[in-house]
Amino acid sequence: MYTLTVVGTGYVGLVSGACYADFGSNVICVDSDASKIERLKALELPFFEPGLPEMVQRNVNEGRLHFTTDLPTAVKESNIVFITVGTPPRKDGSADTSAIYAVAKTVAQNLDGYTLVVQKSTAPVGTARDLYSWMKKFAKRGAEFDVASNPEFLREGSAIETFMRPDRVIIGAETKKSQDLLKKLHDPLFLTETPMVLTTLETAELIKYASNCFLATKISFINEISNVCEALGADVQVVAKGLGMDRRIGSKFLHAGPGYGGSCFPKDTYALASFARAAGERVGIVEAAIAANERQMDRMVDKVVAAVGSPKGKKIAVLGLAFKPNTDDMRAAPSLTIVPGLIKKGYKVVAFDPIAMPKAEPMSELKGVEMAADAYDAARGASAIVLITEWNEFRTLDLAKLKRLMKKPVLCDLRNIYNPEDAEAAGWTYVGVGKGRAGKAIKPKRPAMAAAAKPAAGRKAAKREGKRA
Ligand code: NAD
């Protein structure tokens, strides 16, 4: 049995720590935030993640999962140290890796016997190799250690499932000892035939960025197609369905909406663009995805304004604040751009989110927003509903009841979860994303050849030709 230290008890650290403990390892979770550790010791989790409280409790009760702020002692007791601290974006878009280096320094100073340091935070290509040299400066002479990269791909909202049954495990490790240790640690996953890519440090790091940036680009692509749908009278949901049926493309991440958000895509797209530029290369396609995402969020505000009209004395009910369902993570959530945009236009905003309100309420971007008790409470006296996050409980709202409560029944469904015809039949004005109406397209330019021909003469001539033949 290994003893692992996991540094950082955020989404990645706490989920990884609990899952490795569930696989049978002894896990020490460390965080510099003492209040977080105190709450964790009392089994109070710092964020909402389905299934995690039960898993943490089970492993704490069985004595395999521990919480502390004492990193030096944890390092001395461990064979493997995972670094899972945050890498937030700096003002210039690059990733702030200062927490990784601070942790690595303490780890280096406290190495006791061979230790494998696994860099799991998402960090620019080159970080893991540089950490090794950095740690050498602080480690005792002769201290034995390796640095590996093992990027994480878990998805908030289904983090346990995606950690326990990942599409793949990426291991960047260059010594036999570190490779063997990481392979052994992931044995429970290999038994379920999870594919593994064993590669160099740099390649492992870039796989993580390439994956997130590709997915973000896919979302921006379908969002731009949705705008074309609106202009030319096509339905983006059907376009996406047809597109996704091509197995080379796939149907995932082709849902048009208000733009991507969350703790990863925005910061990772900026970071890739930034470190690629520093290396003298441009990833224009990712830069375009970033710009399209920003335009998409602004476009959502314009969409609401067009549907609701003058803001004078009007209230808007916003449903969903978290960046996606099943999480209370508010980092870079589209609501943090759309709601301030609506307030700036002069509307009063009342919001409801099933889980994220305690995190959302103190945020400066949402200052002045009144939080409601439920969707119906939010809708009372409102001139429109703006649905931003597709929580399951918003999928089957009682539209008749909502309509009675509202001043004007306008549904701005930014996740396309309602059928426009059904909503309109129930007396609503429906606004979706990319739901162009057939026959409303601007007429395409006809080929010059057709325009030049005189149709009447052409038809007569054709008749004559037909008689001759
Ligand atoms: P987070 O902000 O939720 O958690 C980071 C934790 O690290 C916090 O609890 C913080 O107190 C702690 N910390 C910061 N500095 C520390 C220090 N010096 N010593 C000890 N603890 C310290 O972050 P997260 O969402 O878990 O992300 C962590 C990393 O994993 C990031 O690089 C992120 O890009 C990457 N990642 C995140 C996800 C995700 O879904 N959230 C998925 C894959 C990868």
Image (spheres, helix red, strand yellow):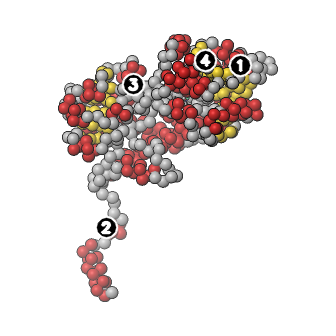
Disc 3 marks which residue?
355
- For mark 4, does the 10 Å Cα neighbourhood hold few (<14), some (14 to 19), or many (20 or more) residues? few
Disc 2 marks which residue?
451
Q: Which tag is nearer the camera, tag 1 or tag 2?
A: 1
Of the pair 41 and 227, the residue shown nearer to us: 41
Q: How far apart are marks 4 and 1 (CA)?
A: 27 Å
Q: Which amino acid does label 3 sit on?
A: Ile
Question: Which of the two discs, 3 and 2, labels the residue nearer the N terminus?
Answer: 3
Of the pair 59 and 230, the residue shown nearer to us: 59
Q: What residue type is labelled 1?
A: Ala
Question: Which of the two discs, 1 and 2, labels the residue nearer the N terminus?
Answer: 1
Q: Is residue 133 left or right of residue 402?
A: right
- For mark 2, does the 10 Å Cα neighbourhood hold few (<14), some (14 to 19), or many (20 or more) residues? few
- Relative image position of residue 145 (x, y in whole percent): 74, 24
Q: Which element is circle 4 on?
A: loop
Q: Which element is circle 2 on?
A: helix
Q: In the rendered image, which quarter is residue 2 located in?
A: top right
